[in-house]
Amino acid sequence: MRLEHSHKSLGTPAHAIAAREAAGVQYGALPWRITERGFEILLVTTRHSGQWIVPKGWPIDGASPHASAEHEALEEAGVLGEIGETAIGAFRHNKKRKNTTLRCDVRVYPLRVTHQRADWPEKSERRARWFRLSDARAAVRSSELKAIIESLAATLRRH
């Protein structure tokens, strides 16, 4: 499933957005590739704090969790590929809102990247960068996300 439009532009009613945020569940993609440098992970920066994280966002009405994650990877990092249909882990993330912080459970889906666009919707709002495995683990703050990155790498090494 390819979703080309942001859920923000789909006219999602405010009450539906509020309900999703109250549930505190987001879906994220863990973009990866294998190059001559070896196994690499693509991370993006958050809008406000600039910390490195995976592309993630709120569920999209009518889309499966993995399709929502795939859409976020395109919107936040400009990458396309093959998304796994099963989450490989979850981590907690504090989502900053105007005057509050919302604690979110981010469910992560692996995305084998086959194409990276030169331009994408949030390119001017975030940085996107490919990291070697050890550098990706060092770049993210969440110990849970570090473990998800390592778990994916271990799985790929076995195959």
Image (cartoon, grey):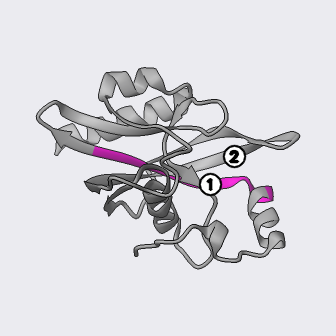
Residue occupying the point 46% across, 71% down: 4
Query: Quick check: 120 above or below 93?
Result: below
* Residue 103 counted in the magenta span: no
Q: Amino acid at mark 2?
A: Cys
- Dominant secondary structure of the magenta stretch? strand
Q: Which of the 4 quarters of the picture holds residue 128?
A: top left
Q: Magenta segment range?
A: 22-32
Residue 8 coordinates in the image, percent (x, y): 66, 67
Q: How many marks?
A: 2
Q: Which label is found at residue 26? A: 1
| Residue 46 in picture, x, y percent from top left | 59, 38
Residue 89's place in the image compared with 134, above or below, is below
Q: CA distance from mark 1 to mark 2?
A: 7 Å
Q: Position of residue 57 (x, y in %)?
A: 60, 55
Quadrant where the image shows the N terminus: bottom left
Instruction: Tell me the residue that label 2 is attached to.
Output: 104
Residues at badges 1 and 2 in contact (C-beta under 8 Å)?
Answer: yes
Please tell me which residue lies in front, 111 or 148: 111
122 to the left or right of 24: left
